[in-house]
Image: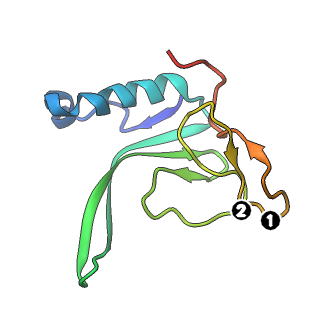
């Protein structure tokens, strides 16, 4: 089971019927990803706006792997190694120059089929 931060769905999310999909995704990530993954929920972010100043938002979920890779960040840095994606059985392409085009699965994939 993935490490979930926060370890419970926040009350404002739990009480809002418009956010039921976020609750389902949180529960699914917790149940599906293995313990090599940490899921950060409802992460605020800031970036420079198009006209200057700052603009902000929220990443519903940011998923990290024990190797330090990040998925879900709107401004994730480029890296060498496996491409990042959600917990999917769809193979992803790597960005590694040493193995161009090599297919790999997401490092947090448990191998369990989707329900």
Q: Identify which residue, 91 or 80, lies in the foreground.
A: 91
Image quarter of residue 95: bottom right
The residue at which mark 2 appears reads as 80
User: Split into 4 quadrants, where in the image is the N terminus?
Assistant: top right
Mark 2 closeness class: few <14, some 14–19, many ≥20 residues within 10 Å: few
Secondary structure at badge 1 equals loop
Secondary structure at badge 2 equals loop
- Seen in the picture, residue 1 relative to 53 is either above or below; the reply is above
| Separation of residues labelled 1 and 2 (CA atoms) | 8 Å
The residue at which mark 1 appears reads as 97
At 55% from the left and 34% from the top, the residue drawn is 87
- Seen in the picture, residue 59 relative to 90 is either above or below; the reply is below
Q: Residue furthest bottom?
A: 52
Image location (x, y in percent) of residue 86? 53, 40
Image quarter of residue 60: top left
Coloration mode:
rainbow
Q: In this view, does 82 lie to the left or right of 12?
A: right
Image location (x, y in percent) of residue 89? 63, 30
Disc nearest the viewer among 1 and 2: 1
Which callout, 1 or 2, points at the residue further toward the start of the chain? 2
At 74% from the left and 42% from the top, the residue drawn is 104
Q: Mark 1 near mark 2, Cβ–Cβ under 8 Å?
A: yes
How many numbered discs sit on the rendered protein? 2
At 57% from the left and 38% from the top, the residue drawn is 37
Image quarter of residue 92: top right
């Amino acid at each position: 089971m993935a490490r979930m931060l926060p370890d419970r769905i926040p009350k404002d999310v739990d009480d809002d019927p418009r956010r039921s999909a976020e609750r389902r995704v949180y529960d699914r990530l917790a149940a599906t990803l293995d313990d090599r993954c940490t899921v950060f929920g409802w992460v605020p972010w800031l970036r420079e706006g198009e006209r200057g100043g700052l603009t902000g938002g929220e990443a519903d979920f940011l998923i990290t792997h024990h190797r330090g890779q990040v998925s879900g960040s709107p401004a994730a840095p480029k890296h060498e190694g496996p491409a990042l994606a959600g917990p999917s059985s769809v193979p992803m392409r790597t960005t590694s120059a040493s193995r161009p085009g090599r297919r790999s699965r997401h490092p947090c994939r448990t191998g369990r089929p989707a329900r």
